[in-house]
Image (spheres, rainbow, N blue to C red):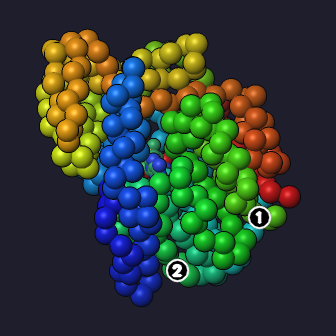
Amino acid sequence: MNFTQDIRVDNESIELINYLPNIGINNVREEILEGLRATPKYLSPKFFYDGKGSDLFEQITHLKEYYPTRTEKKIISSLGEKLDVSFKNLHVIELGSGDSSKISLLFNQISADELKTVTYFPVDISQSAIEKSASELIQQFSLKNITGIVVDFFHQLKLIPKPGRRLFCFFGSTIGNFDTSQARGFMKQLGNTMQSGDSLLLGMDMVKNISVLESAYNDDKGVTEEFNKNILSVVNNLTDSDFSTSGFEHYAFFNVEKSRIEMHLKALKDVEVNLGSEKFHISKGETIHTENSCKFNLDDIERFGMWAGLETVQVFNDPNKWFSLVYYKKN
Ligand SMILES: C[S@@+](CC[C@H](N)C(=O)[O-])C[C@H]1O[C@@H](n2cnc3c(N)ncnc32)[C@H](O)[C@@H]1O
């Protein structure tokens, strides 16, 4: 997570632009402090994703308990002709692109002639994830160009280029990491930046059996636990704080009322943490809320489109209807 280094161009076919320094490291520290001063304490899930966090998330996507990735991948793989998009001269903008493995499933279904006209913009807060995935993609596909954009998409959506007709992809139900008012604000912002003819493919994880949901975030191998605890190392690096990951345990459960998996770090004993001139006391059993993963229903699909001013054109599901991939259009 690179909040200090400026723009860098990698090579002729991959360009990388890092806008995170525009946010300013002091504002990032202030955001972290605000969460730690709050009751209950929280940290934004965007702080999971340094190089190690991105690698751990990729490992999570391969876990037997973690159904969302394989379910969404099956839906994307079988889109074929059903998706009503022309890829000729299209600009594909993938928000929260991670390892880009889902977009490659989409590119696999496009003819080589069309693919040559497609420009791909992976957009992520993790520079290392973009660097790694872009260099893999460029070997695999003859795209016109890849331009990686390192931004915080919640605050810097306006910086995403408008080179022509665009397909936004927001996979992984990452929209579920926002609470309702953040999701409304984000969809509104996204709708405002979209132009007539632009479209959006949005991955949404749907409500289902609680035991399926809870085991997806409590895997046997402890990878999710390691991923959750990594947020403390990222915070230490960004703020020079002295969190010790061994003082906390992973705690994830489904909050029925709010229809979301909540991920927390629970203090195993009383903990003192120093961050600059501030000292935080975290009592044994107290938690730091690190992530929400909202689970949606059919009404949410329409509501998201309405917030963004988009028409809901197509909804693709798996046979169990565990996951929805929604295609919206800006008219
Ligand atoms: C849940 S993962 C999903 C990754 C991938 N799209 C998938 O479906 O497997 C969320 C992704 O969004 C990125 N991300 C999280 N918060 C972000 C933010 N505020 N701005 C930009 N990217 C962010 C993370 O680095 C990560 O790659």
Picture coordinates of residue 220, whole percent (x, y) = 27, 25
Direction from residue 192 to residue 78 in the image, left or right: left
Q: Quadrant of the N terminus?
A: bottom left
Picture coordinates of residue 91, whole percent (x, y) = 64, 71
Q: Depth-wise, is mark 2 or mark 1 nearer the camera?
A: 1
What's the residue type where badge 1 is placed?
Answer: Gln
**Residue 233 can be seen, yes or no:** no
Quarter of the image holding residue 115? bottom right
Picture residue at 39% right of the left edge, 75% below the top: 7
Picture coordinates of residue 291, whole percent (x, y) = 42, 31
Q: Is mark 1 within 8 Å of ligand 1?
A: no
Q: Nearer the viewer, residue 8 or 224?
A: 8
Direction from residue 175 to residue 232 in the image, left or right: left
Direction from residue 233 to residue 182 in the image, left or right: right
Which residue is under mark 2? 145
User: As displayed, is residue 40 above or below residue 308?
Assistant: above
Picture residue at 58% right of the left edge, 51% below the top: 170
Picture residue at 39% right of the left edge, 42% below the top: 31
**Residue 149 can be seen, yes or no:** yes
User: As displayed, is residue 165 above or below residue 183?
Assistant: below
Q: Is mark 2 within 8 Å of ligand 1?
A: no
Taking the view exactly as shown, the residue that stands out farthest to the front is: 277
Q: Nearer the viewer, residue 257 or 199?
A: 257
